Amino acid sequence: MADWNDLPIAAIAAAEPAIPPVTPLSPPIPEPIWRHRPPLQAAAIAASLRTLTHSRMTLPPIPITNMSAPVDPGTPFGLQQFTLLALGNDETAALDYVESLIARGTATELIFLNLLAPAAHRLGEMWEDDTTSFANVTLAVSRLQRILRHLGESVADERRASGAGTVLLTAIPGEQHSFGLAMVAEFFRWDGWDIWTGPFASRRELMALVQERAFDVVGFSVSGDRRLDELKRDIQDIRRDSRNRRVAVLLGGPLLIRRPDLVRTLGADACATDGASAPRVARQIAAAAKDKR
C-alpha cells in the first residue's frame, strides 16, 4: 500500500475520483431588486408601505432579549426591541409586546406617538442603510398597521366624543403616507370627527371631493419641501372651489416642526406638531373660520 506522503501532488490528484463539472444556471440569478433602489427619505418609505403581504415569509431568526418585563415605549432599548420583534418570525410577538405595555398601564396615545411612529421611522432608516430588505420592511410595517387598527378598535366607545365636524386628511396629491395618516385619523376619530382620508392619485380627485362634500377642515401631511409650490396651489384652489367656502386648512408632518413659518407661506390656518394635538387645533381653526364674515 502506497504512502500518500511519498507520492507527488500530481499522482494524488490523478488517484482522486473525478468531480463532474458544474453547469452554470441559465439565466443567471439576478441581483435582488431592492439593492437597486433610488434614494428615499427614511420617514416617507416607512409610512408609504401600504400592502399587507408577505405574511407567511420565512425570515432568518433575530436574537431578542427577554420579554418577561417589557420596558416603557419611547426608550431607546424599548424601541429597538419592538422593531426587532416586528421584523422577526413570530407573527404576534410585536402585538404581544404592545399588549404587555397596555397591561402595565401605558396609555394608547403614548404607544402611538412614542413606539409605533418611531418604529416606522426606524424601519425606514434600516431600509436606507441597507441593513434589511424591502420584503422585511414591508412585513414589519404591515404588522405595525395591524397593531394600529387593533388599538384603534379596542378603545372604549365612551372615550370617543361626537359631533366635532368633518375632516379630510391627506398628503400632497401623488405622495403616499398611509401609516402616518392612519395614526392621525385615529386621534380624530376618538375626538368625534367624521373622517375622510387620502392620499389621492391626482389633484383632480382631491378637488372633486372637496367640491362635492363640505369639509370643516382639510389637513395635509407634509414630509418634505420638494412639492411645496403644488401644495400652495392646492390650498388656494380648495379655498376658492370648496363646497364649504369657510373651510380651514391644517398642516402637519416633520417638516412643519422645523419650519412653522410654512403655515403663513402656504396659506394655511395652523399646524399641529403631532397627531395627539391635531384634533384640538382643528377644532380651534374650524371655529375661527365659522366666525369669519
Image (cartoon, rainbow, N blue to C red):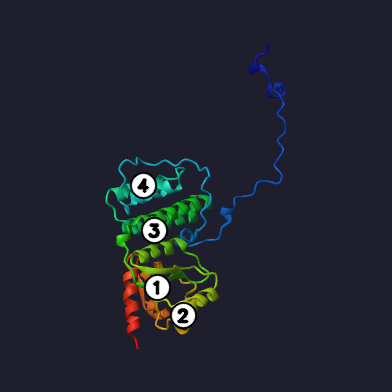
Label 1 vs label 2: CA separation? Answer: 15 Å
Mark 3, mark 4: which one is toward the viewer?
Answer: 4
What's the residue type where badge 1 is placed?
Thr
The residue drawn where x is 50% and y is 58% is 50
Marks 4/1 in contact by CB < 8 Å: the verdict is: no
Marks 1/3 in contact by CB < 8 Å: the verdict is: no
Quick one: quadrant of the N terminus? top right
Mark 1, mark 2: which one is toward the viewer?
Answer: 1
The residue drawn where x is 37% and y is 78% is 269
Mark 3, mark 2: which one is toward the viewer?
Answer: 2
Q: Earlier in the sequence, mark 4 or mark 1?
A: 4
Label 3 vs label 2: CA separation? Answer: 29 Å
Mark 4, mark 1: which one is toward the viewer?
Answer: 1
Q: Where is residue 56 in the image (x, y as percent from the top left)?
A: 52, 45
Q: Where is residue 26 in the image (x, y as percent from the top left)?
A: 71, 44
| Image mark for residue 166 | 1
What's the residue type where badge 2 is placed?
Ile
Instruction: Give the left or right position of residue 207, taking residue 104 as reference.
Output: right
| Image mark for residue 97 | 4
Please say whether residue 116 is visible from this viewpoint.
Answer: yes
Residue for badge 2:
238
> Which of the two residues, 105 or 196, is positioned nearer the viewer here?
196
The residue drawn where x is 41% and y is 53% is 147
Label 2 sits on a secondary structure element that is helix
What's the residue type where badge 3 is placed?
Ala
Residue for badge 3:
117
Label 4 sits on a secondary structure element that is helix
Q: Tag 4: Cα neighbours inside 10 Å, few (<14), some, or many (≥20)?
A: many
